[in-house]
Amino acid sequence: MSKLQTKIEQVKQVLADAVRDFTSVTFANSLGAEDMVLTDLIAKFHPEISIFSLDTGRLPQETYDLMQAVREHYSVPLQVYFPEHTQVEQLVQRIGMNGFYASVENRKGCCHVRKVVPLNRALSGKKAWITGMRRDQAVTRGGLEVSSFDADHGMQKINPLLDWSNAEVWQYIKQNDVPYNKLHDRFYPSIGCAPCTRSVTPGEDIRSGRWWWENPENKECGLHVGSITPIKRV
């Protein structure tokens, strides 16, 4: 068995354990390359796991194209959550349309309204959530565990691809003809909102195109930062 196939089997076991151990499991799909690997595996082996994505209102057209491709390619539905319009209006009145460039505080405030609040609605009533985070994506993610208790949301948080490399992610995508965001072909390794994402040059850190005007230790949007206590490694 190849190294990649071994990792695929491990992910399948993590997903099976999640379904067995928790009554309601959902996958937060950011539509990045890693998350498309998980979309493919969930659709094939555990379609009972619900899948959702967050539409911030500032996404690139290519991301919307991928949302449609997921709908057409897979039988599992993709539930899309939007920010509350009154909160967005108040945010823009307070900092301006692009005021998030002015300070980390403004940027995190924008992420809170457009991402964190909708995430909380999406996770309501769930017992566990799955993400596509990997340890080598950013300095902020080095201490993650495959399975840990997310105290902020009161549920288990599961990261099945934690030890995958970027090369392994793309090997899986190519071998399994998985749809992906076409911005990846234009040197966008990590894709978020259009105003906060840019292409990178060869050799740059994989997350260097996200919030490029900030220091690396600040480069999280609030979805994955909080009081997370490891319970067990799956």
Image: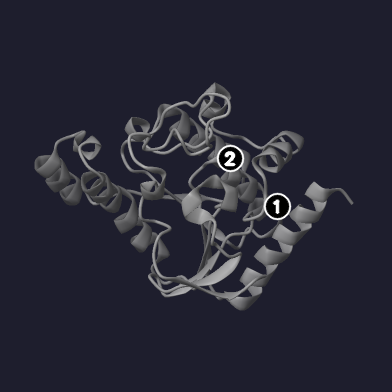
- Mark number, residue 33: 2
Judged from the image, the secondary structure of the residue bearing numbered disc 2 is helix
Above or below residue 155? Residue 67 is above
**Quadrant location, the C terminus:** bottom right
Give the residue type at disc 1.
Answer: Lys
Residue 44 numbered tag: 1
- What percent of the width, then of the height, locates residue 105? 22, 49
As drawn, the label of residue 176 is none
Q: Quadrant of residue 171?
A: top right
Between 131 and 207, the one lying in front of the other is: 207
Residue depicted at 51% across the width and 27% down the height = 183
Residue nearer the viewer, 130 or 228: 228
Which residue is most to the right? Answer: 1
Of all residues shown, which one is farthest toward the left? 93
Q: Secondary structure at mark 1?
A: helix
Residue at 54 percent of width and 62 percent of height: 144
> Residue 191, position in %: x, y?
46, 36
Give the tally of numbered discs: 2
Asked if residue 173 lies left or right of residue 82, the reply is right
Mark nearer the N terminus (1 vs 2): 2
User: From the viewer's perspective, is 184 left or right of 210?
Assistant: right
Is residue 15 left or right of 82 when viewed as pictured? right
Q: Is residue 44 above or below residue 94?
A: below
Q: Amino acid at mark 2?
A: Ala
Instruction: Name the image quarter holding residue 123.
Output: bottom left
The residue mark sitting in front, 1 or 2, is 2
Q: Is residue 5 above or below residue 59?
A: below
Residue 134 seen from this side? no
Counting from the top left corner in percent of width and height, residue 97 is at 18, 34
**Closest to the observer, 208 or 30:** 208
